[in-house]
Amino acid sequence: MAMSPAKITSEQEDQMFRLLRQLDIAPDASQRVTAQAIGVSLGRLNALLKQATDAGLVNIEDRNGPDKRARHTYAITARGAGEKNRLTTQFLTRKLSEYNALHAELTGSTSGLTPISNRNSLMEHNLSPIPELYVSYDSAQKLKVEAGELVSHDLTPRQICDLELLMNGGFNPLKGFLTEADYDGVVDNMRLTTGELWPMPITLDVSEDFAASLEAGQDIALRDQEGVILATMTVTDNWTPNKAKEAEKVFGADDDAHPAVNYLHNQAGKVYLGGPVTGIQQPVHYDFRARRDTPNELRAYFRKMGWRKVVAFQTRNPLHRAHQELTFRAAREAQANLLIHPVVGLTKPGDVDHFTRVRCYEAVLDKYPQSTTAMSLLNLAMRMAGPREAVWHGLIRKNHGCTHFIVGRDHAGPGSNSAGEDFYGAYDAQDLFRAHQEEMGIEMVDFKHMVWVDERAQYEAIDEIEDKDKVTVLNISGTELRRRLAEGLEIPEWFSFPEVVKELRRTKPPRSKQGFTVFFTGFSGSGKSTIANALMVKLMEMGGRPVTLLDGDIVRKNLSSELGFSKEHRDLNIRRIGYVASEITKNGGIAICAPIAPYATTRRAVREDIEGFGAFIEVHVATSIEECERRDRKGLYKLAREGKIKEFTGISDPYDVPANPELSVETENVDVDNCAHQVILKLESMGLIAAE
Ligand code: PPS
């Protein structure tokens, strides 16, 4: 029978694979035993041995032992070991496709086995411990005492998240906050100076004053918000970054509508410090302690359970049925166990709080087959950086011992930019991940958008539905879900689990029962206080929720009596008002604020503080500066014109006109009662007040 050359080659390669494997196991065996073990004649064995020695795969060493028939040791060389690995993968891949073909012939369907790609690195990297930055317990006790003498930096909530993952190996290979050279490489092309892939700048941002007080090479102590020393850091680098460039390169646009760009410009310090970190202790968590695992704890768990392949699912949302279907499918496709790995550090402003989410996850966990699935909480501070974030998430999961990672539609998407368009394409994250997965050593399980097909009563990937025009395709977006929860509307069984819906309703009662904040802004004398007072009385007349008025003058008397009108002091004043209003909102009350609040970024920060707990209604009292000056009820404009009051808003200090307030009210030719009524109508239209 004539054989094709390809067939001869693969047979020869199989023989070489068998020979190398056999010599690896028994290098001292006699030729006869080796030939028998790999199923070839002695003549063929000799030809193969010659080929292997000529190619430098095997060394033949003389052995002057008593057994004359086994005079040689056939030792595999380093090159031979590499060739053996390559041939092993090739052999298994071919066997798998033969198996698939046979399976298809017998059953008319595919076997469902996944191809073996990058097999060696994938199968081993989740088994061994990963380097951490912690010192031993004894050294930590000593270091803690010494560190008490060092200059301290109080970490922000985001920096605490970053530090925890640096110290426990979640951010391996990073050994500290990025140096300037590493930062440049990461920003420009996602590479550290070592050439390793790292897509996200992990930086220690501080104030200019603090940075200026440090010397090169100085050790500092890093403390949490209660003052506990978590680590020390040797400050090797101290520089002022180009934040606009960082925004463009890392987040795709220098647009404050992106939460991380907003953080970069309006919250992060102006200067970055870089240098290695020495870990003393983990940040303390009082919540869900049993559900939090370091990378090494998860690796140990996988070893103990014998999980060689693990597919991780990242989420910042409660799990609904579509997510469960997707994770089931991913585990099946990758033939792997499943790790539900939700983020409980910082997520997108306005997300469901992690306490509620974890209770939801725990309710859903019972619905997964026992001992195939684990859930662990990840204290990551997300950046919502889409494609770069997906690669970052993949590297973090690899460090946590996972071999596969699920990337769905619009992974870690930040929503719309200031022009109302998406920052990233829906599948950009999958593309970037795919381009790097080989190097990352973690394989992507990609998913298109999953939707409910009513006629078949099941979830299907949108692009796989061939009869779209004949079936009813259903989907509830995140925004729609929030609306239904807010308005107390029905959430269908096909969408979520009753336990999850119950939990969400518990923490998110309908809007008409939630707290909210009405935030008036406008020039001095614009009528803010008068309208705010009228509104307060109307809301008190309706009853149901306590109402608190935080008027500009009242606050300045009771909360901010030591403050003046510099930008710094005004910001502090508004942040204080925001803090009190957020507490009132959180606890189900109504806060009415009426400061000038001249700066848009500060108003936005307050909005973010509050929107986690309830609605924020910005009302621009749009009385013109000319009209305010004409009224001049307190005589302050006159004094400002005379230069007797400095930094007076609208005269000698700026006012950012709100770009997108929920409501703008004119006060010229409109009476106060009418203005307050406009606010009431707005609140009604938002579902915040409703008939019992
Ligand atoms: S801010 O900018 O929001 O912190 O201002 P606010 O706390 O609302 O305080 C504004 C009231 O203080 C009086 N006042 C001044 N306003 C603006 N600029 C300067 N320099 C200034 N100095 C004193 C003024 O009466 C404001 O009262 P309202 O209630 O707005 O008329």
Image (cartoon, helix red, strand yellow):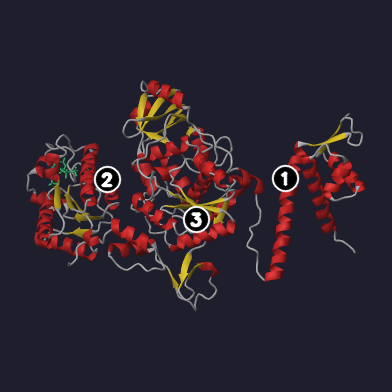
Quote the CA–CA distance across marks 2 and 3. Answer: 49 Å
Crowdedness near tag 2: few (<14), some (14–19) or many (≥20) residues, C-alpha within 10 Å: some
The residue closer to the viewer here, 390 or 299, is 299
Give the number of the disc on residue 506.
Answer: none
Q: Quadrant of residue 270?
A: top left
Query: Residue 277: percent from the left, percent from the top?
Result: 46, 30
> What quarter of the picture does the N terminus occupy?
bottom right
The answer to whether the residue labelled 3 contacts the one labelled 1, judged by CB atoms less than 8 Å apart, is no
Query: Sequence-wise, which precedes: disc 1 or disc 2?
Result: 1
| Vertical comparison of 253 with 205: above or below | below
Foreground disc of the pair 1, 2: 1
Circle 3 residue: 370
User: Relative to 129, is 639 on the left or the right?
Assistant: left
Residue annotated with mark 2: 602
Between 4 and 637, which is closer to the camera in this rendering? 4
Residue at which label 1 appears: 85
Which residue is painted at 65% across and 69% down in the image? 109
Label 1 sits on what residue type?
Asn
Say which of marks 3 and 1 sits in front: 3
User: From what the image shows, is residue 592 above or below residue 326?
Assistant: above
